[in-house]
Every structure is written in structure tokens, then in C-alpha cells.
């Protein structure tokens, strides 16, 4: 029997789930702009899509009568980009990624900026207002 006083022992992040207003609009962002691969999804009773990146996935649920609302409320005007709920994706070169995302019409939330660990980071809004960090190592 396991000792309940010990840590659970989490060893990896499997997926992040986002509620979105439009699967196709979000698919364009995560697949066509960010370059993730759409993968097969089990036949749940509600619409959604799954995307693969490395060993992790992003799961989308299209907003429906039994889901949360799509996106997040807008952060206060004085909130720093990194001080809001966000998730981060590593890329080869943040500045090159920024050029591509700006050319695709993605809305910049903040950056580029240099993190204390030497990484270059920028923050973006996905189509539903989720804050997405894109960063590259030194």
C-alpha cells in the first residue's frame, strides 16, 4: 500500500485543455501558425480537437451548454504578460517566431523580453484570449 504522506510522484505533463468558441479558428492558430500536428481524438459526446507537440498535447473543447465559457476574462490593464495565466511553448528562435506570428495577424500581448535565465520570450493571445508564451533559449 502507498504511503499517503509521500508526494504523488507526477512525472510528466500530458495535456492542457482549452475551451474555445470555434474549433476551426483555433485549429488555424495551433496548426497553421504554431505548427502543431492535429491527431485523432476519441469520440466524446462534445466537439473538440487534439494537437500533438513533442510528448504533450493541447486539447480543445468547443464551448457547449455543459462546458466553461471559451477563453479567459481580460487581465487588468496593469498586469504584466507573465503575471497572467498562460502556458509556454519553446521554439528555436523567438524573434523569428514573432515575425511569423505578426505576419499572420496574431495579437501580441507583450515582449520580446529577456528572462533572467537568458531566454527570450514573447506573449500572444490565441483566438479566444488565452495567453500563449513563445520563448527560445539564449
Image (cartoon, helix red, strand yellow):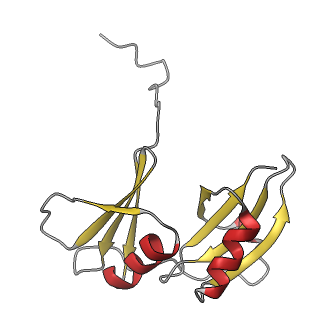
Q: Could you say where residue 15 lies in the image, as x and y percent from the top left?
A: 40, 51
Residue 134's image quarter? bottom right
Q: Which residue is farthest top? A: 1
- Side of 110 where 32 appears, left or right: left
* Residue appearing at x 83%, y 55% in the figure: 115
**Image location (x, y in percent) of residue 60:** 34, 68
Relative to 99, residue 91 above or below: above
Q: Quadrant of residue 87?
A: bottom right
Q: Which quadrant would residue 47 be assigned to in this image?
A: bottom left
Which residue sits at x=38%, y=76%?
27
Q: Is residue 75 visible?
A: no
Question: Looking at this view, is 61 or 135 the one in front?
Answer: 135
**Which residue occupies the extreme bottom position in the image?**
105
The answer to whether 82 appears left or right of 55 in the picture is right
The one of 80 and 2 positioned closer to us in this rendering? 80
Q: Quadrant of the N terminus?
A: top left
Q: Is residue 112 left or right of residue 32?
A: right
Give the x, y percent position of residue 103.
64, 87
How far from the left and from the top, in percent, is residue 36?
Answer: 44, 63
Q: What is the tally of numbered marks visible in this picture?
A: 0
Residue at left offset 70%, top offset 78%:
99
Left or right of 48? Residue 127 is right
Question: Which residue is painted at 59% across and 68% down in the image?
Answer: 132
- State whether residue 67 appears in this view: yes
Amino acid at each position: 500500500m502507498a504511503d499517503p504522506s509521500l508526494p504523488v510522484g507526477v512525472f510528466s505533463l500530458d495535456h492542457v485543455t482549452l475551451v474555445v468558441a470555434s474549433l476551426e479558428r483555433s485549429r488555424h492558430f495551433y496548426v497553421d501558425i504554431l505548427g502543431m500536428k492535429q491527431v485523432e481524438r476519441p469520440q466524446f459526446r462534445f466537439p473538440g480537437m487534439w494537437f500533438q507537440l513533442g510528448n504533450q498535447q493541447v486539447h480543445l473543447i468547443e464551448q457547449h451548454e455543459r462546458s466553461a465559457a471559451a477563453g479567459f476574462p481580460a487581465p487588468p490593464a496593469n498586469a504584466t504578460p507573465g503575471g497572467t495565466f498562460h502556458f509556454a511553448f519553446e521554439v528555436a528562435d523567438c524573434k523569428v517566431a514573432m515575425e511569423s506570428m505578426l505576419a499572420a495577424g496574431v495579437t501580441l500581448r507583450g515582449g520580446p523580453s529577456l528572462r533572467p535565465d537568458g531566454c527570450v520570450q514573447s506573449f500572444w493571445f490565441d483566438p479566444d484570449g488565452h495567453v500563449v508564451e513563445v520563448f527560445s533559449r539564449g
